[in-house]
Amino acid sequence: MGVNLPSSGDTQPLRRVEGAPPGRPALVFALRALGLVAVAVVAGLVWWLIRHDPGTDTEKTAQQTTGEFRFDAAHQPVSATDCAGNSYGKIKEWFAEHPCRKVVRGLYVTTPGQNVRALVSVVVVTMDSPETAQQLKAITDTDDTGNVNDLVKDGTAKLPGAPRVATGEYTSKAAGADVTIVEAQFFDEHKDNALLMRVAADALRLADQLRSAA
């Protein structure tokens, strides 16, 4: 008996086993796995660099915000040894008889509230002894005796719309032979004496940073 062979139109293709990729499945899967591992390694390296880079914005911000407010430098610190030449009023006369060793002046801007900005002058004067430092603090704490020029007053810093810090809040601190003098005033004639006093008091901590920068 003859065998009936199917015509070419009835020929069925061989079925591929389900789940088996064409070609060389083991090699394909291995390459895919290696690709995923490489991506994971690169991502981990980038994250490690971000977390351990001392120059990242996050760490810089943390250093600047140690305290109640963040202070951003509005001008680079200015250092001098002529305190009389950088002062006005009775303070200028006092320095003529009691020369300082060094004076460093800084200028900062802070935002202590929503849509509220303040300009802050920080001055560190180094005298020849703790006794003369206390004398300087006593005379600067007295009204109408003048002060050390802030950087806007003497024209060193050019800030459009800058307020006169001498018309705002004032505070000072003596430590050893150093006297730190802070003056602060709001921009745009904003009024809040209690808040401004907090700003001035918090700015006293900038003395160490100012000394090391100049």
Image: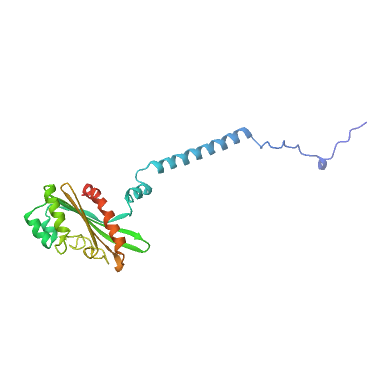
Q: How is the image coloured?
A: rainbow
Residue 144: give x, y in percent of width and height.
Answer: 15, 64
**The quarter of the displayed image where residue 105 is located:** bottom left
Q: How many marks?
A: 0
- Residue farthest to the left? 97
Q: Quadrant of the N terminus?
A: top right
Residue 15: give x, y in percent of width and height.
Answer: 75, 37
- Residue visible at 63% across and 34% down? 25
Residue 187: give x, y in percent of width and height.
Answer: 29, 65
**The quarter of the displayed image where residue 19 is located:** top right
- Residue visible at 82% across and 41% down? 10
Q: Is residue 32 left or right of residue 85?
A: right
- Residue visible at 21% across and 63% down? 166
- Residue farthest to the bottom? 189
Query: Would residue 147 be visible to someone looking at this image?
Result: yes
Residue 57: give x, y in percent of width and height.
Answer: 37, 49
110 or 47, which lies in front?
Answer: 110
Query: Measured along the vertical axis of the image, is residue 76 above or below residue 164?
Result: above
- Residue farthest to the top? 1
Query: Measured along the vertical axis of the image, is residue 66 above or below residue 19?
Result: below
75 or 178, which lies in front?
Answer: 178
**The quarter of the displayed image where residue 110 is located:** bottom left
25 or 6, which lies in front?
Answer: 25
Query: Would residue 24 be visible to someone looking at this image?
Result: no
